[in-house]
Structures are given as C-alpha cells and as structure tokens.
Amino acid sequence: MMTSGLRPVHIIGVPLDLGAGRRGVDMGPSALRIAGLDDRLRSLGYPVVDTGDIDTPIQETADPGDPQKKYIREIAAVCRALFDRSLEALEAGGLPLVLGGDHSLGAGSVAAAAAHGRTRGKPIGLLWVDAHGDMNTPSTSRSGNVHGMPLSALLGQEPAELAGLGGFAPKALPHATVLVGVRNLDEREKGIVRASGVHVFTMKDIDRLGMAAVTEQAISIASHGTAGVHVSFDMDVCDPAIAPGVGTPVKGGLDYREAHLLMEIVADSGRLLSLDVVEVNPVFDMHNSTAQLGTELVLSALGQEIL
C-alpha cells in the first residue's frame, strides 16, 4: 500500500474505433475495467474517479467522408470532448488516465496536457510508446486510417481538424517528443519521422542499449524544461506473444519485463502528467490477457513496486 496524498486518478473511457482498420478496439475501455483497474488503483492508495465513457459514434451510423482521413469529423468531435474532460481533470489536480480505443484519441489527451502546461508557461514532454510512428498525413497514408496520424497532428501538421484542437498548435515540440519501441514504418513515413526532429528509439536501439538506458534517456529528453510528461502507450508496442489483443500486432516487440521496466522508470521519475493506454482489442485477445497486461502496466506507471 502506498501512502496517501496521491493525485486522484480520473479514468476516462474512449470507445473509439473510427480511426482503425480492424474493428473491436471500441471494447478496450470495458476490457480494462473488467481487468479490475479501479480496485487495483485503489489498492495502491489512489483516489479514483471513473468519469465513464465519452460518447462515440459507431461506423454503422457515421459517414466516412474523405477517404484520405476517414471519419475525421467524428474523430475530431470525440477528441474535443476528451480534451475538455482531460483538461478538467488536470485543472482539478488529477491525473487523467485515458482508456482506448484507437490511438487517434491521443490528439485530444495530449492537447489537454499541453494546454495545462501552457498555464504554467511551459511546454510538455511526450513519450509516444508505439510499434508505429503515427506520423502519416492524409496525403501520405495508404489506408486513410486516422489512428496512423495523431502524432503528426500534435506536431502541428495534418490532419488540420486534429492539429487545431484547443485553439493552438503545435501541442508537442519535436525536441521534447520521444518515440519508443518503433519497429513498423512504411517508406514514406520513415522520411517524415526523420525530417520531424523528434527523438526515436527503435527496437534495435532497445536491443543494443537496453530498456533501462533507453527509458532514462527518453524521460530526460521529455522532462528537460517541460511542465511534465504525457505518456501515450499503445499496447501494440508489446510483442504479440504477451499482447495478442491489439489492433495492429507486429512481431518483435517489448517483452513483459521490458514493458514493466519502462513504466516503473516513468513512475520513478515523478514527471507523469497524464497517461493513455490504447489499442486494446478484445476481439483478438485470449482470456482478456492484453487488458490484464495493460492494467498491470498502468499500476507500474503509478508506482506499484516489486518490493
């Protein structure tokens, strides 16, 4: 049991699958709750406020619109609602814990952290923990799936509907933005990532340097001169052997201890502002194991210790 005086955790569910190619991540927030997230956070001593789910349309009732950025109007509306709810939690002294849902929601959650940082006169640091770069734009994306675009929007590029959320841009500055765990970029996106100026630690870097060294460097970069760090954790950064229930699985990801070590070092830093856990897809899961892992990783990020 941890000591009292901890920031209240505000759970925000975002059952969004309009940005993804494979259906099912809209059930992610429920799967994480079923894994006992609320009770397990309370066991660490955290006050918990579950604010419920943000209203999110389903594909059957929505118009995909522009094929280069499908469902962008609806996704932007969900992200605006998430921005408002996350910012309210931050202004109340809470820690927004956003449960996804596809990764396009990051355009809203990170924007809220950035708006909160602006009230302190500082930018935020961003750790984008993901197998993918999520830096495509409507003109470079082959699929038109918006969950491959949110980091581009946060850096002030396209889609404009997401980049302009909150009335300011960019939300994230390249020098304080770190991609961790990348292992699946298409050729066009490789050029975008290289030109962006963000810091990148691929799986090759993790293999060579070790998870501890990479995470410590990443947090140092994201913490320098910032109001704190937002961590956006896509469960597909983990290897499918331990996280089969994700939207876009890619072999060769983080193993169980690497994922936990990353989150444990985040907790040790004391710099965590807010946290996303996204792309849990129960349709492809086994016995809710991916949601169980996601819940355990949240606990590690919030200070659960081995001893």
Image (spheres, helix red, strand yellow):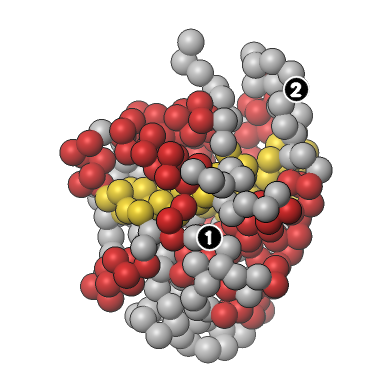
In the image, what residue occupies the spot 63% across and 34% down? Answer: 37
Q: CA distance from mark 2 to mark 1?
A: 30 Å
Query: What residue does disc 1 label?
Result: 172
Instruction: Evaluate whether residue 289 shows in this view.
Output: no
Q: Label for residue 197? A: none
Q: Position of residue 109 (x, y in %)?
A: 63, 56
Mark 2 Cα shell of 10 Å, populated few (<14), some (14-19), many (≥20): few
Q: Is residue 37 left or right of residue 257?
A: right
Q: Earlier in the sequence, mark 2 or mark 1?
A: 2
Q: Position of residue 55 (x, y in %)?
A: 74, 64
What amino acid type should be assigned to the residue bearing mark 2?
A: Gly
In the image, what residue occupies the spot 32% across and 38% down? Answer: 214
Q: Is residue 8 above or below residue 126?
A: above
Q: Label for residue 5? A: 2
Mark 1 Cα shell of 10 Å, populated few (<14), some (14-19), many (≥20): many
Depth check: 141 or 92 in front? 92
Depth check: 37 or 231 in front? 231
Name the secondary structure under disc 1: loop
Instruction: Evaluate whether residue 114 shows in this view.
Output: yes
In the image, what residue occupies the spot 53% across and 89% down? Answer: 66
Q: Is residue 77 left or right of residue 277?
A: right
The image quarter containing residue 295 is: top right
Depth check: 158 or 145 in front? 158
Q: Is residue 233 above or below residue 301?
A: below
What amino acid type should be assigned to the residue bearing mark 1?
A: Ala
Name the secondary structure under disc 2: loop
State the quadrant of the N terminus: top right
Nearest to viewer (mark 2 / mark 1): 1
Q: Is residue 197 left or right of residue 18?
A: left
- Most extreme residue toward the top, as rendered? 307
